[in-house]
Image: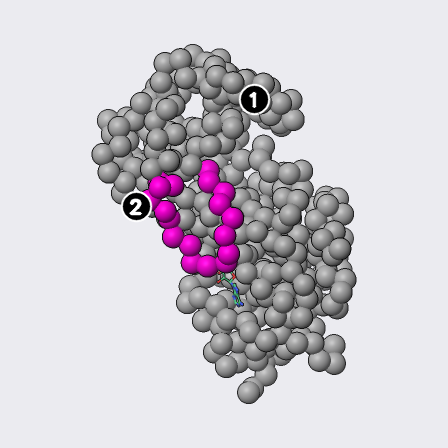
Amino acid sequence: MDTRNFDVIVIGAGIAGATCAAALAPTHRVALVEAEEAAGYHSTGRSAAFWILNYGPPDVRTLTGLSRQFFEHPPAGFTEHPLTRRRAMLLVAPAGQEAQLQTLLAEGIGLRELDVAKAWELVPALRPGYVRAAAIEEDAFDMDVDAILQGYLRQVRTHGGVLALRHRAGRIERQDGVWQVETSAGARFAAPVVVNAAGAWADEVARQAGLPGLRLVPCRRTAAIIDPAPWQVADWPMVNEVAHTWYVRPEARTKLLVSPADQTPTHPHDVQPEELDVAIAIDRMQQGLGIEVRRVERSWAGLRTFTPDGSLAFGWDKRAEGFCWCAGQGGYGIQTSPAAGRLIADIIAGRDPGEAGRILPAVDPGRFAA
Ligand SMILES: Cc1cc2nc3c(=O)[nH]c(=O)nc-3n(C[C@H](O)[C@H](O)[C@H](O)COP(=O)(O)OP(=O)(O)OC[C@H]3O[C@@H](n4cnc5c(N)ncnc54)[C@H](O)[C@@H]3O)c2cc1C
């Protein structure tokens, strides 16, 4: 078996692996190793593509905030299309959720209370009497996930990095200070550093390297596209129920993405939507919005993978030299990705990560070692 030598092997070409590889490629020889025949086939290609600052634990919020500049002003040549479209996020509190809304307002940044009548003006399909209190994050936006992913992959290639599709990393061994990664395509990649960016499979990849996993939990989330006609939804905000049991977001100007915000623990696999979850999404949405659903145009499910405490798992594994985690992105992997990729690259290159460095204690994978 021929061995190809690199400085860093990144396992997994979802958004996590792609951003790490792109941030490393200008200074390191990088191999980005992906099991599937297309990058982004799993969680990255199945997201709701939305950026919200007031979402997730503090480490996530920090990286989300630090990523904003990149999405709004990507470097020259990164993309031919804008990566974002401004869209507010409307939080609606039905009866019983008013106190929870006040807590979110107290903790939030750039989140402000909105008059119920104003919420109704923004989303006229809201059922009269449903909303008891509301809040709005005006600076949120839709993201063009495919353009983001392709831009990062282009950066990898431009700097001489290798994207190896259809290469599932199998045996991973460290010999004489170098990791050897054998793949399903019969190739062997060698490098002193491995980045584990395998999403739902990250624990499995660790075990292949002889390390215990972090007890990551992949959770299924479902989304469906419906036609909300006669409602004109293009300029609606994203609508999120405060208790987060459903949300909707306009899609492609005339459609609506609906999700029951499900979070069903499962194992790493090519997850498919359950009809029941789609029905629940529509039922919950219809309690808040007077939208008739004649037909579901398409539906899908993806995995959101969480660590036991819900924060990220980023950094060196102290039990194995040269093994770096980039896992546990949960439901925030796209919106945090530019800053996350830079942070992992800075850790590997031994550079000062600047402001992002303040989250390092909270995201240290060593916290699960016991
Ligand atoms: C319905 C839904 C809505 C979401 N909405 C949002 C949102 O609005 N905003 C947001 O920021 N995030 C959202 N997310 C979360 C986001 O999609 C994920 O956090 C993100 O895509 C995770 O990226 P990843 O690269 O870690 O994982 P993935 O994209 O799954 O990539 C991991 C890759 O590793 C590969 N791999 C696994 N094992 C191996 C191996 N042994 N060898 C080689 N390759 C391997 C896999 O094939 C896969 O391509 C949503 C997710 C879902 C499911």
Circle 2 is placed at which residue position?
298
- Image quadrant for the N terminus? bottom right
- In magenta, the rendered stretch is 261-278
- In percent of width and height, residue 270 lies at 42, 58
> In the rendered view, would you say 128 is above or below 270?
above
Q: In this view, does 135 lie to the left or right of 363?
A: left
Q: Which residue is drawn at 53% across and 69% down?
A: 33
Is residue 274 part of the magenta span, yes or no? yes
Is residue 58 among the parts visible in the rendering?
yes
- In percent of width and height, residue 46 lies at 42, 50
> In the rendered view, would you say 51 is above or below 361?
above
Q: Which residue is drawn at 54% across and 60% down?
A: 201
Outermost residue toward the bottom in this view:
1
Q: Is residue 253 left or right of residue 246?
A: left
Q: Which mark is residue 101?
A: 1
Q: Which residue is drawn at 47% across and 48% down?
A: 220
- In percent of width and height, residue 285 lies at 37, 29
